[in-house]
Image (spheres, helix red, strand yellow):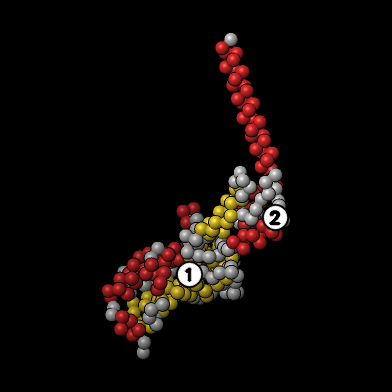
Amino acid sequence: MKKFWKKGIWLLFVAGICTVLGFAKSEHKRIPCELPLISINHDTGHDFITDEMVLEKLRNIGYSFQGDQICEVDLFRVESEIKKISGVARVEAYTYIDGGLQIDVVQRRPILRVINYSGTSFYLDEKGLTMPISDHYSAKVPVVSGNFNEPLNANVNEIAKVDSIADKTLLDDMFIIASTIDTSDFWKNQIVQIHVNRNKEFEMIPRVGSQRIMFGSADAAEGKFKKLEIFYKKGIDADRLNLYDTLSVEYKGQIVCSKIN
């Protein structure tokens, strides 16, 4: 008899829970969805995305947020549309039980701006992916230009998966150099422009000093930058720096300086 009562009480409890949830769900459908709460992460140091850009994307797919029922909001579609904005790395959309819609956006972080021979311009981000230039915001990163014509959709290969040196592209080399610059506050402040010459080798224009740095290929990029940093900080007095028109680190173990005639 006790088992029967326990079982009956348990069934009543489950039925009560289902009734409450069903009522809550019914009420939930009648709650209008207000303007979303938009949170844009600015930890990357860039401002590619604004609240208005997110709202415009939502309006373009039919969301006015002026009486739409919360059950009618397609969260997957909301996320898909916002991801189309240049500069968006990740987006998550979710709803609260009171009808509020929350949209969290994480921005991409470019480390290099590329301008190819035909004039097409795009960014390389920290993961080696290309991203379109934004009409809203311009990132302050080094610019590479010159004799190459890599297109916007030519993403960098994953270095660990490159089978041979023949698989590497010029964009891979750009990414290697930009990634090395990105690890150093000194070089992020010092290198403003990179030129690719006819031999597909890199030349750099520093912020301080009138000389051109002949960097050569991207091979041993980290070691080349370390040599240059020692030279700038300890190898030469600042007032003598402009006596040279070129600095070359193309040769292993040395820096070759050329004086202005």
Q: Residues within 10 Å of mark 2 (few under 14, many from 20)?
A: few
Q: Residues within 10 Å of mark 1 (few under 14, many from 20)?
A: many
x, y percent for residue 203: 44, 75
Q: Nearer the viewer, residue 169 or 165?
A: 169
Q: Residue at x 65, y 53 (%)?
A: 34
Position of 230 with respect to 52 (left or right) is: left
Q: Residue at x 59, y 74 (%)?
A: 119
Which corner quadrant of the image does residue 56 belong to?
Answer: bottom right
Q: Secondary structure at mark 2?
A: loop
Q: Which mark is residue 141?
A: 1
Q: Residue at x 69, y 39 (%)?
A: 26
Q: Secondary structure at mark 1?
A: loop
Q: Which mark is residue 162?
A: none
Which corner quadrant of the image does residue 238 belong to?
Answer: bottom left
x, y percent for residue 165: 47, 60
Q: CA distance from mark 2 to mark 1?
A: 41 Å
Indicate the amino acid at tag 2: Gln
x, y percent for residue 110: 50, 64
- Residue 19 visible to an observer of this rendering: yes
x, y percent for residue 102: 59, 51
Q: Residue at x 57, y 74 (%)?
A: 117
Position of 177 with respect to 99 (left or right) is: left
Which residue does the numbered mark 2 point to in the structure image? 66
Indicate the amino acid at tag 1: Val
- Residue 131 visible to an observer of this rendering: no
Q: Nearer the viewer, residue 82 or 31?
A: 31
Tag in front: 2 or 1: 2
Q: Earlier in the sequence, mark 2 or mark 1?
A: 2
